[in-house]
Image: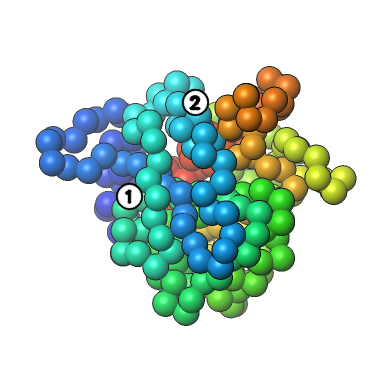
Amino acid sequence: MVTTYVRIILLFIVLTGYRPCQGQIPVKIAKLKYNGGGDWYANKTALPNLIRFCNDELSMNLPSEEDIVEVGSRDIFLYPYIYMTGHGNVVFSEAEASNLRKYLSGGGFLHVDDNYGLDKFIRIELKKVFPELELIEVPFDHPVYHQKFDFPKGLPKIHEHDGKPAQGFGLFFDSRLVVFYSFESDLGNGWEDQRIHNDPQEKRLQALRMGANLIAYCFTHSF
């Protein structure tokens, strides 16, 4: 389990740019690989672009590429921030849900980014992880919206799908935000290379800034 001590060390490494000795593992972020047939691998250029933005704008020292981690793997505890996306079906086994609960309740942070079509599946699976919790809209005054970049109206709208407003939902465990669910926003598409999603530059910047806020919040509040 990720202890408070370990999280503080991870925070120190990322924010100071400390380079570990040879043979030690640098702090990385990861994309979640899940079962059920959904395209967990979507948005392949998104996280490298977000990492580059965080390194430039927040003076972080994250490695340039994300790792891939499976829901049921013990390796999940190596990552302070895990990103999950896709368009389709998601299935967590009982063992996977238990592993994810231990990770989140022990200090981890999961960002679920609906890439359109994920909503009806992920809500069911998150209930397996925290059956006692309900997804609620994260208040606009929550710190996740007010890190280096200020979002007084909450989650920005990046891509249009069904004409619905962007909403940031969350699961709070012991008063701590452990899951942030970006719905009807599609942040990951805004992080992608411009050749893939030719969004206006201002939309791309909004997406990257909100992503940077999530990373910053994760490293400063999730332990």
Q: Which residue lies most toward the front here? A: 37
Is residue 171 in view? no
Q: Residue at x 27, y 53 (%)?
A: 5
Name the disc covering residue 132, or none.
none
Q: Is residue 198 or residue 60 the one in the foreground?
A: 198
In the depicted structure, whether residue 168 falls above or below residue 16: below
Q: List x then y, in percent, for residue 118.
A: 67, 58
Left/right of residue 37 with respect to residue 102 in the rendered view: right
Q: Nearer the viewer, residue 111 or 105?
A: 111
- First in sequence: mark 1 vs mark 2: 1
Q: Secondary structure at mark 1?
A: helix
Q: Is residue 154 left or right of residue 192?
A: right
Q: Which residue is mark 1?
A: 7
Of the 4 image quadrants, the one containing the C terminus is: bottom left
Residue drawn at (70%, 25%) of the image: 198
Q: Is residue 125 visible in this depiction of the protein? A: yes
Give the residue type that dot 1 points to: Arg
Q: Position of residue 110 (x, y in %)?
A: 50, 54
Tell me the distance, in whole angstroms, between the alpha carbons under discs 1 and 2: 22 Å
| Residue drawn at 47 percent across, 79 percent down | 94
Residue 143: percent from left, percent from top: 59, 43
The kind of residue on which mark 2 rests is Phe
Category of crowding for the residue at label 1, using alpha-carbon neighbours closer than 10 angstroms: few (below 14), some (14–19), many (at least 20): many
Q: Residue 35: image x %, image y %?
A: 51, 66
Eye-nearest disc, 1 or 2: 2
Callouts 1 and 2 close, C-beta under 8 Å? no
Residue 53, label in figure: 2
Residues packed near mark 2 inside 10 Å, few (<14), some (14 to 19) or many (20 plus): some
Q: Looking at the image, is 218 positioned above or below residue 37?
A: above
